[in-house]
Image (cartoon, rainbow, N blue to C red):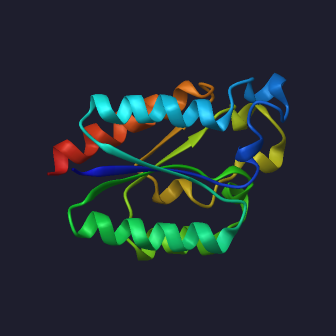
């Protein structure tokens, strides 16, 4: 079965406890369960990942890019967390692996601190989902599935 990867960057393991007024009270385990249900409805296997380490995320991007090229994956829904703003290694990995990505942010980053307004990864994304809370993961999964079905 074809897979979809949902990848989460630094500090997303703290969902549910870190700034619930911004990120809500849903835990990362709850997000994984929701994503698994969404993927299953679309006939996809879910690979759900989180790391606080940039190098690990780069490795996963390379691996998923290879799976896409082999026809085993449709790509990645990616919440880069703080890496959004400065992680050029992640940006270059996405580009180098030709990885189809839909970027997701739980909060509306454009309504927050100025440094959150710039993303080094967004220009490579097929689309960006911002500000819908954890429901954004559902939107991103469905969007990536739709884009993949149109491109074959």
The residue at 71%/38% (across/down) is: 109
Work out which residue is located at the far left of the displayed protein and give it. 152
The residue at 29%/40% (across/down) is: 145
- Residue 16 x %, y %: 76, 30
**86 or 135, nearer to the observer:** 135
Side (left or right) of 109 relative to 141: right
Q: Is residue 130 visible?
A: no
The residue at 51%/57% (across/down) is: 123
**76 or 44, nearer to the observer:** 44
| Quarter of the rendering containing residue 69 | bottom left
Q: Is residue 37 visible?
A: yes
- Residue 148 x %, y %: 24, 47
- Residue 125 x %, y %: 46, 53
Relative vertical location of residue 112 with respect to residue 67 in this rendering, above or below? above
Side (left or right) of 59 relative to 149: right
**138 or 107, nearer to the observer:** 138
**136 or 57, nearer to the observer:** 57
Q: Across the whole image, how many numbered discs are drawn on residues?
A: 0
Relative vertical location of residue 70 with respect to residue 9 in this rendering, above or below? below
| Quarter of the rendering containing residue 24 | top right
- Residue 2 x %, y %: 24, 51
Relative vertical location of residue 141 with respect to residue 97 in this rendering, above or below? above
Side (left or right) of 67 relative to 29: left
The residue at 57%/59% (across/down) is: 121
């Amino acid at each position: 079965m074809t897979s979809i990867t949902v990848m989460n960057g630094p500090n997303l393991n703290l969902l549910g406890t870190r700034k619930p007024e911004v990120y809500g009270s849903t835990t990362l385990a709850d997000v994984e369960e929701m994503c698994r249900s969404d993927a299953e409805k679309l006939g996809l296997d879910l690979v759900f990942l989180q790391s606080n380490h940039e190098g690990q995320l780069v490795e996963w991007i390379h691996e998923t890019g290879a799976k896409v090229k082999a026809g085993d994956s449709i790509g990645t829904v990616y919440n880069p967390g703080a890496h959004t703003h400065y992680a050029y290694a992640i940006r270059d990995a996405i580009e180098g692996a030709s990885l189809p990505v839909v970027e997701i942010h739980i909060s509306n980053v454009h309504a927050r601190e100025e440094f959150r307004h710039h993303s080094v990864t967004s220009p490579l994304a097929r689309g960006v989902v911002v500000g819908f809370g954890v429901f954004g993961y559902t939107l991103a999964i469905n969007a990536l599935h739709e884009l993949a079905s149109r491109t074959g």
